[in-house]
Image: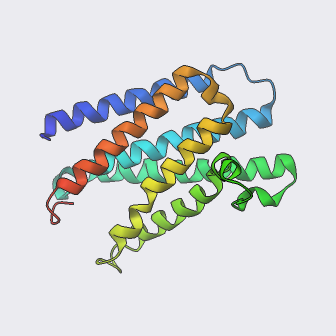
Amino acid sequence: MIVKEKFIFLAISLILFLELVISALTYDYKDIQQSVIRLTGLIGFASLFISVIMSNFFEEYKEKNKKNLFSHHLFSIIGIVLITLHPVIYAVYKSDIGVFLPKFDSWEIFWELAGRPSLILLYIGFVSGILLKIYKKFWRGFHMIVYISLFFGLIHAYLLGTDFKNPYIAFIFVLLFLIMVYVLIDKRLKPKEIF
């Protein structure tokens, strides 16, 4: 993909992100704790999708334009902080530390609560990115776990997310997911020295 097309692609992704934030912030929430739980989940999740989409611009990250790499890292950190706060606040709200543990009671329960293993996978992917300099040969495989994490998170949000009942919000996340899948395929087609 040429540079101009990539920036158009990124602009569309960022517009979707901003639309989502505006839609979430203008929603009439009744309970402040529920509002914070939902907003941290939505904005954190969207930030992670944008971060992954930005990772497709690797060749623009080199010395000539470190701002793009900084933006990728910024969205990653915002996403991880907010998506971590999502279950932390919920655990406090419910007074139940068990909200962090995956459940395997049934296929349906596993997928409804897929946000739990999603968070664990996300941390593995995040730590592998930090260890890039140390484990140059192995970091990429572990870092790719982020894609699986976001898939799990999407299923969890679709099955349990209150905001996903809003077709507009659901549509934005499905679109971000499809863009992420495209990014994954595009990366796999690039020569190893670029990706």
Q: Residue at x 12, y 40 (%)?
A: 2
Please determine whether, in this image, residue 15 is positioned above or below residue 89.
Answer: above
Give the residue at the far front of this rendering. Answer: 106
The answer to whether residue 163 is left or right of residue 169 is: right
Identify the image quadrant of the N terminus: top left
Q: Examine the rendered structure and indicate whether residue 188 appears above or below residue 49.
A: below
Looking at the image, the residue that sits furthest to the right is 95
Across the whole image, how many numbered discs are drawn on residues?
0
- Can you tell which quarter of the image residue 138 is in? bottom left
Quadrant of the image for the C terminus?
bottom left
What residue appears at the point 40 percent right and 54 percent down from the top-left corner? 73
Using the rendered image of the protein, determine whether residue 33 is visible from the camera's viewpoint. yes
Colour pattern: rainbow
Expressed as whole percent of the image width and height from the top left, the position of residue 192 reads: 17, 65
Residue 57 in sight here: no
Residue 49 image point, x, y percent: 44, 43
Q: Residue at x 56, y 43 (%)?
A: 155
**10 or 166, which is in the foreground?**
166
Q: Residue at x 46, y 33 (%)?
A: 174
Question: Does 8 sit above or below residue 104?
Answer: above
Left or right, 97 with respect to 173, comes to right
Q: Position of residue 148 (x, y in %)?
A: 46, 55
